[in-house]
Image (cartoon, grey):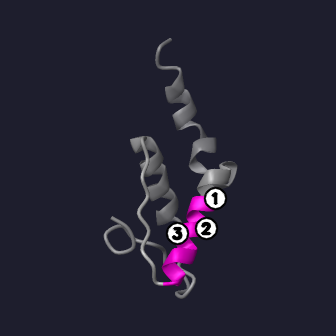
Amino acid sequence: DSDWWLDVLEDKICREADYSGKMVLLIDLLSMSSEAGDKTLVFSQSLLTLDLVELFLAKLPRRERQGKFWKQGKDWY
């Protein structure tokens, strides 16, 4: 089957940042950058990777605001 990888993408493991050391590091860098008032530009060869980054950012709580999360269009574009 040429679409074997679709099952991997649908698997829960692709939805958890903690399973990827690089993703954990990226989220930490983005958080520290935001706290310092800096902006960060992220490049990737994979649109799937950028989609996953957006998914994780949407779940990322804002440290200075209790119960608030990062939002597309405000915290990232």
Residue 8: tell me if it is visible.
yes
Q: What's under tag 3, amino acid-wise? A: Leu
Residue lying at 62% horizontally and 52% vertically, measured from the top left: 22
Q: Which residue is mark 1?
A: 24
Please tell me whether residue 53 is drawn above or below residue 4 in the rendered image.
Answer: below
Q: Nearer the viewer, residue 55 or 27?
A: 27
Q: Are marks 2 and 3 in contact (CB under 8 Å)?
A: yes
Q: What's under tag 1, amino acid-wise? A: Val
Q: Residue extending furthest top?
A: 1
Q: What's under tag 2, amino acid-wise? A: Asp
Residue lying at 38% horizontally and 68% vertically, measured from the top left: 76
Q: Are marks 3 and 1 in contact (CB under 8 Å)?
A: no
Residue lying at 52% horizontally and 35% vertically, measured from the top left: 9
Residue segment shown in magenta: 24-36
Q: CA distance from mark 2 to mark 3?
A: 5 Å
Q: Are marks 2 and 1 in contact (CB under 8 Å)?
A: yes
Q: Which residue is mark 2?
A: 28
**Position of 51 compared to 74: left or right?**
right
Q: Nearer the viewer, residue 25 or 48?
A: 25
Q: Which residue is mark 3?
A: 30
Residue 61: tell me if it is visible.
no
Query: Is residue 46 located in the magenta-colored stretch of the structure?
Result: no
Residue 72's x, y, as percent? 36, 67
Q: Secondary structure at mark 1?
A: helix
| Among numbered discs 3 and 1, the one appearing first in the sequence | 1
